[in-house]
Image (cartoon, helix red, strand yellow):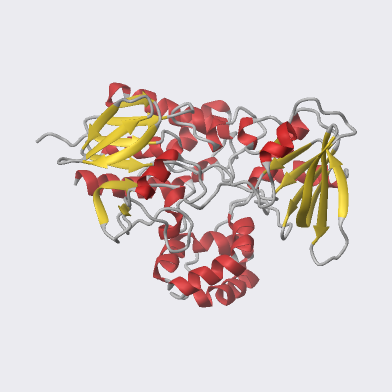
Amino acid sequence: MTQPRIAVIGAGASGTIQALHLLRRGAGQVALIERERVPGRGTAYGTTRPEHLLNVPANKMIVYPDDPGHFARWFAPFGGAPDDYAPRMLFGDYLCELKDAAGDAIEVIGGEAVDVVPGTQGEEIRLADGGSLHADAVILALGNLRPATPPGIDPDRLGSAYVDDPWFGGFLEGLGDQDMILLLGTGLTAIDAALTLDATGFRGRILSLSRRGLAPRPHIRKDDSSDAEPDYPGDLSWLLNAFRKRSDVVGWRVAVQEMRPVTQTLWTGAPLPTKLRFLRHLRPWWDVHRHRIAPAVAERIAAMESEGRLTFAAGRARKIAPDGHGLAVSWQPRGSKEVITEQVRYAVNCTGPDLGLANSGDPLLATLRGAGRIRPDPCRLGLNVDAGSRVIDAFGNASPSLSAIGPITRGAFWESIAVPDISVQARDLAERLLG
């Protein structure tokens, strides 16, 4: 029996992991389509900065659920212990090695997919250069979408002093110790930007600003785990009280880790109003406690704060306008009527990945949505998919040949951005497609 030809659009971590699981399941060849980055790396693992560390120890970066120590063993010759936090670029090297070891079984196609059209047998992928290819099944592995421009900002008016996507640089040039940098956001992207500024010798001031001013919490220098199996309620509405009680017993870090096996079940079983209430009121606190930073990163950030070079602030940017050498920024601290005006060299958009389809700027998503082949999930976190990762169209029908994986499926699974969760999703999707 001839195995179906499967194409994966997006060759970052999600797409590469998906291709590896398809091969493990018996796919003869997988087409991996990538428009701009080195296959196997994506945004997070495409960094070349050694100060950017993984947010979990090596032994928790699980690509193969049936071999959880695979990456930790690969990391060992580099001097890394299983509980060390490896540089993210090394995990990118690891994924590239796994992809390269597959040889011709993974066909890497450099190009931009702009449409996926259903045919009599499978799908036709159309590329921006006019080319096309056919596949029995297509998987969208688009990773994290680029950050959305914050409200009230006109990038064209602000010019080069406004950096819309920090992953493409543009905020390290021409800096002096008297300069100030504004980071719009206080999450993981802002942490990376602050680390890079520090590592490249910037000694001026950094203001990291968000509505609540919440920054990611640190891991501690020991394994955040316990052998207990707490009885968390099956209702998301009651989870907060149960979590607080459990935290009083084992500490909040262990309590968060204990929730990992049940989080997806709680999310998928919750009614839509409960999910929306969680997103509206609790999500910022969930994110900073769930997605923590390595101890060494936390120590560096704390040192920058104690030296007065980095400040996390809660508030809103009211006005950003060109001002000679940089920008004049007026911002209002949360809970205050005072408006503070600062002169900054760069304002850097660190708000994190855009979660909406309407303003993503991705040509493929725009085309698919216009054709009715995809629709936003009810929480507006990404694509609407079913429990088998099949994409649901505008009429509510699940596609037999178009699927999605990774962060863009967060609305369905919630936990779909960490490598272990993506790997389980990739394994299950490969089993469904290849039987």
Q: Residue at x 55, y 49 (%)?
A: 354
Can I make out residue 268 in this image? Answer: yes
Q: Nearer the viewer, residue 122 or 215?
A: 122
The part of the image, by quadrant, that contains residue 154 is top right
Q: Residue 214's x, y, as percent? A: 71, 57
Image position of 372 (left or right of 333): left
The part of the image, by quadrant, that contains residue 299 is top right
Q: Residue at x 66, y 30 (%)?
A: 169
Q: Residue at x 27, y 40 (%)?
A: 117
Q: Nearer the viewer, residue 336 or 99?
A: 336
Image position of 370 (left or right of 333): left
Image position of 180 (left or right of 133): right
Q: Residue 59's x, y, as percent? A: 50, 43
Can I make out residue 226 in this image? Answer: no
Residue at the right extreme?
Answer: 178
Q: Residue 25's x, y, as percent? A: 24, 40
Residue at the front extreme?
Answer: 157
Image position of 390 (left or right of 143): left
Residue at the left extreme?
Answer: 1
Q: Residue 317's x, y, as percent? A: 76, 53
Q: Is residue 186 above or below residue 323?
A: below
Q: Quadrant of the N terminus?
A: top left
Q: Is residue 146 above or below residue 374?
A: above
Q: How many marks?
A: 0
Q: Nearer the viewer, residue 142 or 62?
A: 142
Q: Is residue 148 above or below residue 28?
A: below
Q: Residue at x 18, y 37 (%)?
A: 4
Q: Is residue 184 above or below residue 322?
A: below
